[in-house]
Image (cartoon, rainbow, N blue to C red):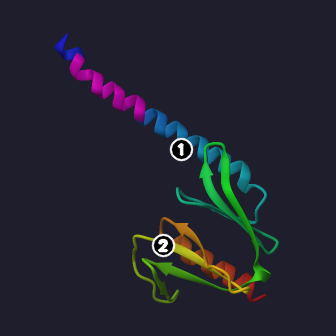
Amino acid sequence: MVHGLLWLPLLAIFFGLAWAGWNEYQKVQGYGAWALQYEKSKYDIYAALGYRSGTLTWGKPLRKGIEDRQVMDLTALKGIQLRVDGVVVPIVDPPDRGQVIAVELLPLSGGDLIQIPFVNIDPAIEWVNFLQAKLNT
């Protein structure tokens, strides 16, 4: 009886991890279906981002799909920059890592800056370079 009680917390942890894995799998499946319509897309735990024909779409990936979806045309932007830990950093010499990483969109209208969060710096740099090239064409 004592051995059974000792294994009970491990069984609960196993089921919790199985549920978390299934939940993440559902998010990735939803993202995969969503991303098919875009020329370039990215997915991480913070945001899903897609680019098609001069239009950016981003939102928070959830099991039921992409929530809080926002859309912006590149012609409405005056610039794109990389922000790491609250500081705008140059693309040519970025830090190796950071706690808070975001691609920042600067609207022409002078409104609020838009930040799209990233988990890692390398994909963020790749997106900044890609979007700046599209913005300059």
Which residue: 41% across, 33% down? 16
Residue 85 locus on image (x, y percent): 42, 77
Q: Quadrant of residue 36?
A: bottom right
In the rendered view, would you say 100 is above or below 2? below
Number of other residues with Cα within 10 Å of mark 1, as a class: few under 14, some 14 to 19, many 20 or more? some
| Left or right of 103 on screen, residue 55 | right
In screen coordinates, is 11 left or right of 136?
Answer: left
Choose between 100 and 122: the one closer to the eye.
100
Question: Is residue 14 rendered magenta in the image?
Answer: yes
- Location of the C terminus by quadrant is bottom right
Q: Is residue 29 shown above or below 95? A: above
Residue for badge 2: 101
Q: Amino acid at mark 1?
A: Glu
The disc, 2 or 1, on the residue closer to the chain's N-terminal end is 1
Residue 109 lies within the magenta run: no
Looking at the image, the residue that sits furthest to the top is 1
**In this picture, which residue range is highlighted in magenta?**
5-16
Residue type of the residue flagged with mark 2: Ile
Alpha-carbon distance for marks 2 and 1?
22 Å
Q: Is 111 or 93 nearer to us in this picture?
A: 111
Label 1, on which residue? 24
Report the predominant secondary structure element of the magenta stretch: helix
Pointer 2 local density, CA inside 10 Å: few below 14, some 14–19, many at least 20: many
Q: Residue 112 at what x, y percent from top left?
A: 63, 79
Instruction: Report x, y in % for residue 61.
Output: 61, 53
Say which of 134 and 112 sits in front: 112
Query: Which numbered marker is on residue 88?
Result: none
Asked if residue 73 lies left or right of residue 17, the reply is right
| Marks 2,1: beta carbons within 8 A | no
Q: Is residue 16 left or right of residue 69?
A: left
Residue drawn at (39%, 74%) of the image: 97
Query: Which residue is situated farthest in the front direction here?
Result: 111
